[in-house]
Image: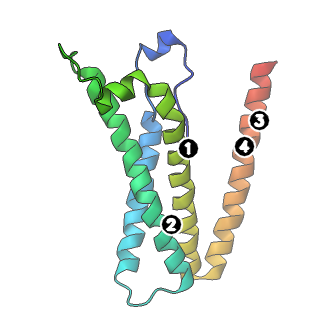
Amino acid sequence: MRCYMDKPQSEQNSKFTLVGEIDKIMIGGLIAFSLIIIQAFISMPVLDPPAFISMIAFSIALPILVSALVHDLLIKMRQGTPKRPRPQPNSINDLLLKQGRRFAKPTFSMVNIGFWLTIGGIIAALWHASWIFGVLCLISGAFAFIVYFSHILISSYDMDS
């Protein structure tokens, strides 16, 4: 996931965006997938350990992912409204706009935590169906993780040169 805090001022147009458009679609997909799995597991009378782990991961990840989308929406709504003649000094929106960069890093790390919890919940849900599915998901996920971060390392090395 990307955070657009470090763009030059001309690209930002004096606006702060935590979650990019592609990331919003990805987070929305993770939320939808989580809700589908929760819907299947919530009607089960007894949860086995993989299903229980999956439910715990989704129970933690869903509020985090939803709060990231709501946080970004509140910032965009606040930027689109005209300034009030007498702003309240301790309002949350004023604090978010004035201290946007200070709040961005914790919120961005919370989005990453929500992302990894959702992935863990998906793996646990697949493990519930069959341990073979869980192992295959772990192997393919580890491969994708290695490819992704090798691409990031190569890109950052090329930018330094």
- Three-letter code, disc 3: Leu
The CA distance from mark 2 to mark 4 is: 24 Å
- Three-letter code, disc 2: Ala
Q: Is residue 20 left or right of residue 82?
A: right
- Comes first in the chain, label 3 or label 2: 2
- Comes first in the chain, label 3 or label 1: 1
Disc 1 on helix, strand or loop? helix
Which residue has dot 4 on it? 149
Q: Which mark is residue 153?
A: 3
Disc 3 on helix, strand or loop? helix
Disc 2 on helix, strand or loop? helix
Pointer 2 with pointer 1, Cβ within 8 A: no
What kind of colouring is applied to the model shown? rainbow
The CA distance from mark 4 to mark 1 is: 17 Å
Q: Position of residue 112 (x, y in %)?
A: 55, 48
Q: Position of residue 56 (x, y in %)?
A: 48, 70
The CA distance from mark 3 to mark 2 is: 29 Å
Nearer to us of marks 3 and 2 is 2
Q: Position of residue 1 (x, y in %)?
A: 55, 41
Q: What residue appears at the point 34 percent right and 83 percent down from the top-left corner?
A: 43
Which residue has dot 1 on it? 109
Nearer to us of marks 2 and 4 is 2
**For the residue carrying disc 3, how many other residues have a C-alpha within 10 Å: few (<14), some (14-19), or many (20+)?**
few
Please say if 143 is above or below 99: below
Q: What residue appears at the point 45 percent right and 55 percent down from the top-left corner?
A: 30
Which residue has dot 2 on it? 57
Foreground residue among 84 and 36:
84
